[in-house]
Image (spheres, grey):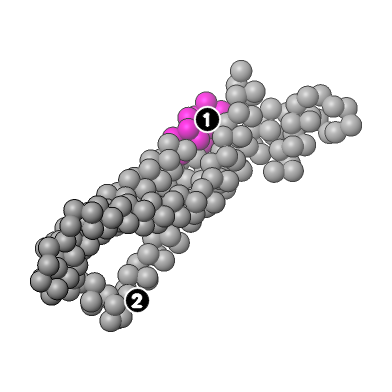
Amino acid sequence: MKELDLLKKDWNKNDNYPKFSEQEIYAMLHKTSSSAVKWIFIISIIEFTFGILLNVGMNFTKSHKDTIELLKSAGIFTFYQIASALIWMVAIYFIYRFYRAYRGISTIDNVKLLMQNILDARKIVKSYIIFNLVAGTIFLLVVYSFVIDQILSKVALEQHKVMTTGVYIGAFAGVIAVTAIFIGGFWLIYRLLYGFLLNRLKKNYNELQKIEY
């Protein structure tokens, strides 16, 4: 962003720097905004591809087969399949939205339209992050809860004893804690991956306001 810093100094009419017209400033902001949205699109594709490869790779492991059997015995395998499919489909939808945002912002030649497209791009990214965090939380809580309940029931049957309420409360508290750790980790990753790009778009939007108003 050194170029933009230079332009800002020109905007403040510092005589030590070369002068730039509003059109030149707009062109620079347009270029960096388009680049930021392009990287958002690229990162989302990489994220999606990595998820697919990870899932395919897991299919050939014994732990995956054991997990599937556990999900089936817990009566939640159908939910697991449907929820997973929906999450993947929504991910594809957002990737498409990112692509449209990039195509739209890269061909804009109007300050107001560029500002609106920057706002739209930021909203799409934020919606994508919120969806992933909320959907991930619900998915993990439901799956873990049923699996833990199945495990506790199996242990109680094998040991011929009834699990106390305290055991169930402790187990589900553990489920919530593990889910919170996973979701917190994803939030940090998203903050690193998309946070910088969102901040760049916000900064560009603020600079465009100076041109427009």
What secondary structure is marked by label 2? helix
Q: Nearer the viewer, residue 154 or 165?
A: 165
Position of residue 135 measured from the top left corner of the image (x, y, whole percent): 30, 49
Q: Main secondary structure of the magenta part?
A: helix
Identify the mark nearer the N-term, 2 or 1: 2
Residue 165 visible here:
yes
Q: Residues within 10 Å of mark 1 (few under 14, many from 20)?
A: many
Q: Nearer the viewer, residue 178 or 137?
A: 178
Q: Residue furthest right?
A: 16
Which residue is the site of mark 2? 57
In the figure, residue 152 lies in which quadrant?
A: bottom left
- Which residue lies at the image location 23% right of the left edge and 76% below the top edge? 66
Q: Is residue 199 left or right of residue 93?
A: right
Which residue is the site of mark 1? 115
Instruction: Determine whether label 2 and label 1 are within 8 Å by CB.
Output: no
Position of residue 193 measured from the top left corner of the image (x, y, whole percent): 52, 52
- Which residue lies at the image location 32% right of the left edge and 45% below the top edge? 134
Q: How many marks?
A: 2
Task: State how far apart marks 2 and 1 are (Cα).
Answer: 42 Å
What secondary structure is marked by label 1? helix
Residue 113: say if magenta.
yes
Residue 76: say if magenta.
no
Tag 1: amino acid: Met
Relative to 51, is 19 above or below? above
Position of residue 8 measured from the top left corner of the image (x, y, whole percent): 74, 31
Tag 2: amino acid: Gly
Relative to 191, is 148 above or below? below
Relative to 30, is 47 above or below? below
Instruction: Please state, as top left, top right, bottom left or bottom right, where the N terminus lies in the image.
Output: top right
| Segment tinted magenta in the rendering | 107-121
Q: Is residue 69 left or right of residue 116?
A: left
